[in-house]
Amino acid sequence: MSVALIMAHAGHWFAGLLYLAPVIIVVAALWRQSYKDKRRGDDEEPEGESGVEAGPEVD
Amino acid sequence: MTSFARRARLAALGTVVLALALPGTASAHGLVGKQDLPIPRWLFAWAAAVVLVASFVGLAVLWSKPRLQQLVERRRFGIPRVLEVLVGALGVAAFVFFVYAGFAGTQTDTANILPTIIYVYFWVGIPFLSAVFGDVFRAFNPWLAIGKATGWAAKRLGGEVSAEPLPYPPWLGRWPAVVGVLVFAWVELVYANRDDPSQLSIMALAYAATQLVGMSLYGVEAWSNRGDAFGVYFGLFARVSPLHWRDRALYTRPLLGGCPSLTPVAGTVALLCTMIGTTSFDGFSQGTIWNSIVPHLQDFFGSLGLNAEHALEWAGTVGIVVMCLFIRLLYRLGIMGMETVGRRRPASELAGSFAHTLIPIALAYVVAHYFSLLAYNGQAIAALASDPLGTGSDLLGTSDVAINYTWVSATGIWYVQVAALVLGHVAGLTLAHDRALSVYAKARDATRSQYWMLAVMVAFTSLGLWLLSAAAQQ
């Protein structure tokens, strides 16, 4: 059932890929940039320095 | 390979596979006519991605300090108590009337005012109003008004004898709202008798009764702030608005200014993902892919002994839950990426800290998906208001007013949808950047942490445009 289902919608797959492509490109670019940042070794943040977790509650 | 990298790759692979397995068409409500676009629809997704990346770069360069974390509100004017009471009473009267219409009116869904009021004006219209004018539903909320009136009466009559409400359990958080929104969406999208006016009236009464029980147990304010699904749902959209109604006064604040103050109690992320997921499923469920999958699911549930109608409902139930989980997975991927930046913070902490960034996205999905419904089907109110029960009356002389499908073209609707999605995601990106600047000690880490939110925003935008573009091809 699943193979037939997949093959029957090859056209939709292609149309879907056109929308998925920018996501893949952005993810790949960011992944690469992140890897380069890590290689540079500037991934460390001093302990105990962090900001807020959430703003004031106003329900 | 680190365990995170393994998990991230597996999750990313799963997301891509799921996204590929689910491409197809979806239909926006009430879309009429053919779109006349200068470029292919998929190019809009590419253009939207470029806008998001440019916004990200712009934020990184120009927005170096948090600006939205400290709420600055200016009081404009007060509201007399009598007006609050009157508006609440109006809400109760409207609720009673619409419930009565559901029972006493014709059971033809298009002729009875109740289905249009619930699905068009209540579910879709109020989010639009909330985003512009603030939390207007809270003023008209009928069960809140009844709860307040009951509390006031109990105090006057019982004095000190009246029992104190139970403390609202922290673990419950916004989970009652998650259940309420999911159940409503299920009724709207899956339930076979979704348009039956008397059934809708029964459900409205059941919901109101549940709210009254919740308020009596945990207190009016505590329950309405956390457990009233519709109050919480509309209240989240109201956080986008520059207007804030509180303490019987109107305050103004920057646009989106109410979002950072969202407290990420239990169920908050689940609620926002459910809001986006149910809207996404609304589109997806009308597409050819879903309609080609659903017979197989129906056969499966039929083989378990269910009749065709219930088997179809179970298939829809599976679809709506899977879509909500898919949205949750996308958000989770962004959080997992953030987890790797700077000093390690637990994913649960980050997920809560950035939950408010999903509010404008949920709003964008609602605007993009339901704008045409409001623009076209919303006009039916002219005829329905004149004959609310569908009994042939013509109280206002407008019972024969027809819907004008030409005031906005299909092309115009497409541009509204694209603009809503792009602006909503840029707003989400802005909120995430601002929060990152306050969470991370170094601006550089804040920017790097947002690589992953950028990816999530691009994914949400592409998903939204993909669902909508397919609708236009129906």
Image: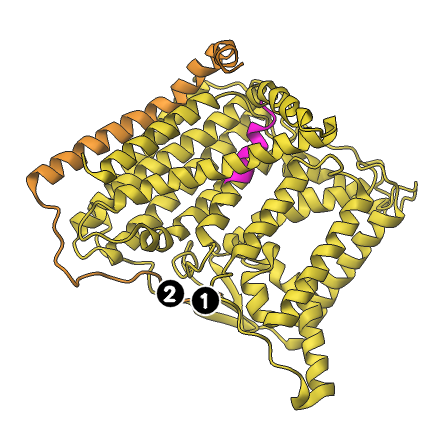
Chain colours: A orange, B yellow
In the displayed structure, would residue B287 be above or below residue B407?
Answer: above
Secondary structure beneath dot 1 equals loop
Tell whether position B55 is magenta. Answer: no
Amino acid carrying mark 2 in the image: Leu
Amino acid carrying mark 1 in the image: Val
Tell whether position B282 is magenta. Answer: yes
Q: Which residue, as the protein is rendered here, is positioned at the far front?
A: B304
Badge 1 crowding class, 10 Å Cα cut-off, few under 14, some 14 to 19, many 20 or more, is some
Q: Position of residue A19 (x, y in %)?
A: 40, 23
User: If the image is split into quadrants, where does the N terminus of chain B sit?
Assistant: top left
Q: Circle 2 sits on which residue?
A: B71
Q: Position of residue B270 (x, y in %)?
A: 47, 48
Q: Which residues are magenta?
A: B277-287
Of B22 and A54, nearer the camera is B22
B34 left or right, relative to B336: right
Chain letter of disc 2 in the image: B
B368 left or right, relative to A57: right
Chain letter of disc 1 in the image: A
Q: Circle 1 sits on which residue?
A: A58
User: If the image is split into quadrants, where does the C terminus of chain B sit?
Assistant: top right
